[in-house]
Amino acid sequence: MIQASSEKQVAIKVDNARKVYGHPETGFVALKEVNLDIYDNEFFTLLGPSGCGKTTLLRMIAGFESVTKGKIELFGDEISALPPNKRPINTVFQNYALFPHMTILDNVIFGVKMLGETAGTSKTRAKEMLELVQLDQFSHRKPSELSGGQQQRVAMARALAPHPKVLLLDEPLSALDLKLRQAMRVELKRIQRDAGITFVFVTHDQEEALAMSDRIAVFSQGELQQIGNAKDVYDAPENKFVADFIGETNLVDVKVDKLSEGKAHCVLPGGASITCPSAAAAHKGEGHISIRPERLSLGKAGTGRLDGTVIQQIYLGTDTQVELRLDDGEALTARLQNSSPDAIPDIGAVVGLDFEEGAARLLVD
Ligand code: ATP
């Protein structure tokens, strides 16, 4: 597992935390022992497919779910037993539920007043937060007079107004349409930077995670698979799950005959050999290398590391996806930029496939 070493202060420490729903011995294990550190002022994302346990972990940090085993610390203090309202943590949910009869300003004031602050302080903080989300000019409108993205920003302002140390965001963009979601990615990152606090963001959308996060924790079936920044998890996945879940990839069967200092010597189908980067836990013998579709180039048959036949071309605007089949039946995908001068080969053509050694990576199954 890749974990960045850093001198930064740890905001949240998840220490051997396990979650079993129902009976601790016989119930459903939603999270196996999870260990991770989330740094102060970090945009940290919990990413994985539906049911992998990411919301469970977020709810454990918020205090809405108990920790079956292990503990959770906030800036060095154990918080596992504290109720949600005693944690200096706030959550923004997917359905942000603003009060329809209140103005935007009153909606945000509400979040601070709940903490027992005076009317004056609540109003000042609410105004500051509406400025932060750039909605101060709309403070007298009702929620129904705002767009979906603007309403989501009001929900952010309301959650930030009590000055939490950590803001948790549970798929907050999933109710928005694609264009708005893309715009909100940029906006959320800016708000996090300007607010200067830790954001823990849950999503199943890998593109969203890559676009916004300082670091990403990838989960599958209740288990943490890898932690790293966007480039780490995309360019240097540890295992097949991460390679496949983060973007698209080609998995090519290889025979590994030598492993040393993070490099693997592998024999490809067809007999060519390469020395490529290797996952830490990879082993000799049968294995798989991952090569991203955009790292494959196509040329004349016999000139590349592999030969394949073009099965299909799919025009996608900026690029063309080319589906290929190797002699042993393995299917591969290449993505060729439509702006590049390289011709897209015809369906049925036999071509040579090539890639730089650094573009391949030997994985753990
Ligand atoms: P999604 O993206 O669909 O929300 P998730 O990764 O956030 O998925 P969780 O909500 O954390 O997943 O759920 C993890 C597993 O725990 C799932 O299999 C789910 O069915 C199960 N689970 C969640 N809540 C409970 C509960 N209260 N009782 C029993 N099982 C639960």
Image: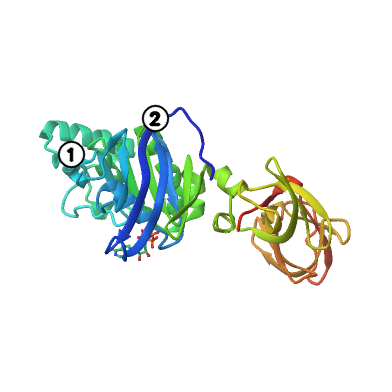
Mark 2 Cα-neighbour bin, 10 Å: few <14, some 14–19, many ≥20: few
Residue 291 in the image: state x and y as whole percent.
68, 54
- Residue at 13% of width from left, 34% of height from top? 117
Left or right of residue 207, residue 302 in this image: right
Q: Amino acid at mark 1?
A: Val
**Residue 26 location in percent, x, y?**
32, 66
Question: Left or right of 267: which side holds 144?
Answer: left
Q: Nearer the viewer, residue 338 or 226?
A: 226
The residue that appears at 35% across and 39% down in the rendered structure is: 12
Q: Which residue is mark 1?
A: 112
Callout 2 amino acid: Gln
Give the label on residue 276, or none: none
Number of on-image labels: 2
- Which residue does the image show at 48% across and 42% down from the upper left? 215
Depicted 288 relative to depicted 138: above or below: below
The residue at label 2 has a CB less than 8 Å from ligand 1: no
Q: Residue furthest front?
A: 25
Q: Under tag 1, what secondary structure? A: helix
Q: Which residue is mark 2?
A: 9
10 Å neighbourhood of mark 1: few (<14), some, or many (≥20)? many
